Image (cartoon, rainbow, N blue to C red):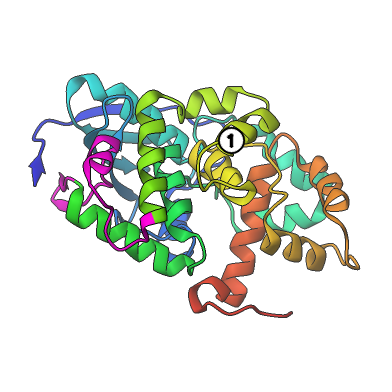
Amino acid sequence: MTPIDQSTWLDLPVAGPFDLAASARFLEGFAPAARSDAAAADGELRLAFPVAPSWRPVGVLVRQPAPGGPVRVAVRGEPSDVEHAAAAVRRILSLDVDGSGFAAVGARDPVVGELQRRYPGLRPVGFHSPYEAACFAIIAHRIRITQAATLKSQLAQRFGVPVDVHGVALPTFPAPEVLRALPRVPWVSELKSDRLHAVAEAAQSGLLDAAELRALPVDEALARLRQLPGIGPFSAELVLLRGAAHPDGFPVAEGRLHEEMTRAYGLDNPKVPELAAIADNWRPYRTWAALLMRVRREEETNEITTGRRVER
């Protein structure tokens, strides 16, 4: 256990609607995002993770006393990690994006407008870092997402550093140097172990820096990510959109999203370019609108939780 007795309270600026409780429900109930390293209570969210660039463990308590009101965080960690941790939380909760223009997307697209009314204040909730997202992508290859989430949790429990976050013990995913030091990553194949080592090396070298990835044109960022062993088109989008939390990308490799769009817009076997053209109307919040589509699909079908495809 790593008890960090002193907390530094910081105010996080928020532009546009945001509801922390909606983010907490997303983390707890949506299988692709569900993880054991988050604990939520009314108006609060607890997170623990290794923070770049030091990759030391930090614990964060996030509070929003009133829906749509100010957001405050208490960061427990080394003093030099506090600002980095706060910046990571802003990215994880999509608070580093001005959301005041998102309502305009719903005004011009009734499908998105209905989703905004159904999930008020919900913004994308990302992985703690592109590094963790890439590790999850490697682990999840050819197995169910729920299985991958369990394996990722086991790695955190065994090799991560547990942190006491305001009375709640939370595990942190192993830092890159810890993962690289393992001769063989347990519970995965030798090929996946080698690929996880490569991801950890890339993280240590700065190739998975979230701000840098987001600053690149989307196609260029995806091409860089696909250079990593085991990171194909689908995984590269996961790392960029869910790891770096890029707010404006259309997942061209996300079949479930495409199926949901086909249903929602009443289309007949559309091709990906046709769906991408529809998503152009969501700019500059394509990731946000796509997330709402995926949340509704999983809420209504539970197909990822159950592992079965659902025809509607």
* Residue 98 visible within the image: yes
Considering depth in this image, is 251 or 27 the residue closer to the camera? 251
Confirm whether the magenta stretch covers residue 167.
Answer: yes
Residue marked by disc 1: 246
Q: Is residue 204 above or below residue 145?
A: above
Q: Is residue 63 above or below residue 312?
A: above
Residue beneath the point at 61% across and 44% down: 237
Confirm whether the magenta stretch covers residue 176.
Answer: yes
Q: Position of residue 272 (x, y in %)?
A: 82, 53
Residue beneath the point at 42% across and 57% down: 139
* Residue 118 visible within the image: no
Q: Residues within 10 Å of mark 1 (few under 14, many from 20)?
A: many
Image-based side of 259 in relation to 292, left or right: right
Q: Position of residue 159 (x, y in %)?
A: 19, 50
Image-based side of 99 in relation to 276, left or right: left
Please give the range of residues in magenta: 161-190
Considering depth in this image, is 236 or 287 the residue closer to the camera? 236
Considering depth in this image, is 122 or 242 the residue closer to the camera? 242
Image-based side of 45 in relation to 312, left or right: left
Total count of labels: 1
Q: Position of residue 202 (x, y in %)?
A: 41, 31
| Residue that sits furthest to the top in the current view | 80
Amino acid type shown at disc 1: His
Q: Is residue 237 above or below residue 52?
A: below
Residue beneath the point at 59% across and 53% down: 120
In the picture, which quadrant includes the C terminus? bottom right
Q: Disc 1 on helix, strand or loop? A: loop
Q: Position of residue 176 (x, y in %)?
A: 30, 37
Residue beneath the point at 49% across and 64% down: 30
